[in-house]
Image (cartoon, coloured by chain):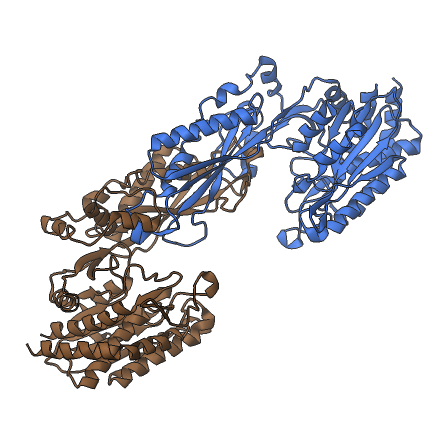
Chain colours: A brown, B blue
Amino acid sequence: MGHLEHLNEVFKAIDENQEEFVELLREAVEIRSVSADPARRPDCIKMCEWARDQLKSVGADTSLWDLGFEKPDLPLPPAVFGVYGRDKAKKTLLIYGHLDVQPAEKEDGWNTDPFKLIEIDGKLFGRGSTDDKGPVIAWIAVLKILKRLGIELPVNLKFVLEGMEESGSEGLEEGLKNNLDKISDVNFSCISDNYWLGKNKPCLTYGLRGICYYFVEISCARQDLHSGINGGSVPEAMNDLVWIMSQLVSVQGEILIPGIAELVAPLTKEEETLYDNIDFCMETFKGEMGSHGLLADNKQRLLMNRWRYPSLSLHGIEGAFSQPGAKTVIPAKVTGKFSLRIVPDLTPEATDKLVVNYLNALWAKRGSPNQIKITPCHGGKPWLADFRDANFSAGARAIERVFGTTPDFTREGGSIPITLTIQELTGSPVMLLPIGASDDMAHSQNEKLNRENFVKGMKVLAAYLFELGA
Amino acid sequence: MGHLEHLNEVFKAIDENQEEFVELLREAVEIRSVSADPARRPDCIKMCEWARDQLKSVGADTSLWDLGFEKPDLPLPPAVFGVYGRDKAKKTLLIYGHLDVQPAEKEDGWNTDPFKLIEIDGKLFGRGSTDDKGPVIAWIAVLKILKRLGIELPVNLKFVLEGMEESGSEGLEEGLKNNLDKISDVNFSCISDNYWLGKNKPCLTYGLRGICYYFVEISCARQDLHSGINGGSVPEAMNDLVWIMSQLVSVQGEILIPGIAELVAPLTKEEETLYDNIDFCMETFKGEMGSHGLLADNKQRLLMNRWRYPSLSLHGIEGAFSQPGAKTVIPAKVTGKFSLRIVPDLTPEATDKLVVNYLNALWAKRGSPNQIKITPCHGGKPWLADFRDANFSAGARAIERVFGTTPDFTREGGSIPITLTIQELTGSPVMLLPIGASDDMAHSQNEKLNRENFVKGMKVLAAYLFELGA
């Protein structure tokens, strides 16, 4: 197998040139591309141009997709589109990544300046180091090495890099739809924007839960009342609302809404065994959260609860007294907020129907004279890939080559909506290939990427390209 | 009865000189004595000095009690103490009132400048017109008239006027305790700082509910969690809290805490009949609140619910998501807030014990691994006077003379803590004698005092003095 020989050479070059790529990451971290901050919009645009230039320098054909405006006076950063190779005999891989970052201030509790990359004990600290500048640069590093070694790529590549992921990927779906012809030949997609389940063992991720969010508004009066003057005279909205919210999920975490459990895809024997070997420690997980208990008594069931079963969380109440202190108010209108994380085969439509029917039945049972308004919010569908497909097989073999171990096949409990968008628009399979560790602190203080993860990540990406093209 | 002849003369003079007292109210309203606003503290002090000067001008011996500081750099306004008459053969009446007002801005929705008294259709609009500058000036007007007519007062008067009532009467209780010798000879007290039950019929108020406020804090993790990543893995604090809050009061408003109902003083036949003739319309009350229902199906029971039975209100939750929008958070620590309005014979101590025991029993039943912390806040005791005592009889006869009708004897659902303080420190009965109407909008926009209530109020106060001294 010719690509194997190439790979050893590639790995060696990655090892030898790693400092160069750390410097590249340093350069990227210093561009403060905080998409949530309108004042940083020029930096977001600069970061996209920087990435475009990097792709260009390795030989990609690049363009910037104008995605319009966030507000009349606030342009969205352009999406960076790159084409590397146009050989019709080869398969085409779409690589997605993002160039914007979460806000960060030293005062938030960072030990170092968040926008200066600093290495301590093999950890590269800096905002965006792992989410998601590091993985994007790992791809660029692979291309630089291959170009330098004069090795031809076994697949064509198409890059889609955006600058608004941390702010809901605003404009990207429309941008992709407007450029559908440019991605119509994509055979596989790969996204490196998530994390290992733990700190030691790599994984490939084949599933994400969707979400359905609900508002339940109850009103009892025209305006807030005084609990002294009116306490005892009026049926209170808060009383109705906490009762309704108490009827949604049991203390054991079971969803009490009839019909939800029945729609969940049954657990097959084959799937069940998949959970046995996953590298995951209940106690470590509990300790990291600082929680007082867990909703399952074994690893398998706990991971299933997070990945392949729906869950219901109560987020809060709008309109009631939420400040410190002791205000004696009877809130006139309160809105309870909760959401379900949904999984195959639950659709947002079916979930909405079951939830709304149950809430209406609860309300009828309650017999309160107050008024209720139930608002289901737009839900995100769950994503589930076939982890035995050619894409995942290539990814798994790549990981084996670098780490000497087969990866865990994981799902995640949250959503990365662009995953499903890309899968639907390209009509081809997507794989999530994380290179960062679970303790990288994406979105938090002291975000970091281990140098080892960064370097081994480049090797995995390179190996994946050759496995995919084999 | 000599005083009757006097009264006709007094009433006539009040009618003829009313414009003078409206002007006095105008002057007082223009002093922006907003006690909640530190920037207005000089105005609060100025207002106290203004009242001192008014009392001095009618011949009272006055002093200002230094009440210390609210913060190191923010002095409390002094209490105004006035002594009018020192005849040991006469009874002594303590009159309490306050000179500070709630905040008010035109932009809040006032139709006119809140600090300019303006009369429209017999209504004197202006901040403080009814709460509580109007009633204080009504007392001063009575003294001016009596002085002018050369009529000797049948009782000695002691005035205690403060400038911090709207900010919790800070400093006053200590001020009174420091000057206990000056009020030790008080036989009766009168407070005009509440309102008629309706718009047409005067009342005398003999009861106020107390309050016990509770915080229930439940924590499930070290910090907020992500409902995608962790939903289904951890027993959620919000889930426990809404369940607990749902177990406190029924949809019909019954308090579900065992033992509370048993401690409420039983309703006597005599007391029950008191409610029959009270001028109160359920539909009007419901319409004013814009509520969708009421917790009683007859007037008597509704008034009792507000005045002589305890009620439990749920105020809100601190720590949970309370903003607009759809945040997918699992709050790590949430604090539910509720309070009971308590009545005789419930004491704050007994109520605390029953509530805490019940919450602990609920928590044991819940079987959640989370942590709970129950915090009872300092409660206010209920106040209940004997409406058949000499003070109330004098008040009732005074109202009969002016309005030609016996007043309703009412209680109120809220608290005026100074009432109980004065009763306890003087060791003598207190009466609440309101002169404003129920629609005066104290604490709200477009506060007003009807000219008729102002003028008739002066007459009632004058008549009350003579009835008390008879």
Residue toward you, A102 or B271: A102
Q: Residue A341: percent from the left, percent from the top?
A: 28, 51
Q: Is residue A468 left or right of residue A287?
A: left
Q: At x 41% / y 71%, what residue is drawn?
A: A115
Q: Is residue A143 visible?
A: yes
Q: Quadrant of residue B83?
A: top right
Q: Residue B53: percent from the left, percent from the top?
A: 86, 42
Q: Is residue A84 above or below residue A165?
A: below
Q: Is residue B108 above or below residue B59?
A: below
Q: At x 43% / y 73%, what residue is drawn?
A: A41
Total numbered labels: 0
Q: Is residue B216 above or below residue A52?
A: above
Q: Is residue A65 visible?
A: no
Q: Residue A100: percent from the left, percent from the top?
A: 36, 70
Q: Is residue A199 left or right of residue B366?
A: left
Direction right: furthest residue: B150
Q: Is residue B461 left or right of residue A18?
A: right
- Quadrant for the C terminus of chain A in the image: bottom left
Residue toward you, B237 or A339: B237
Residue toward you, A264 or B281: A264
Direction left: furthest residue: A1
Q: Residue A279: percent from the left, percent from the top?
A: 20, 54
- Quadrant for the N terminus of chain A in the image: bottom left
Q: Is residue A405 left or right of residue B313?
A: left
Residue toward you, B20 or B173: B173
Direction top: furthest residue: B269
Q: Quadrant of residue B342?
A: top right
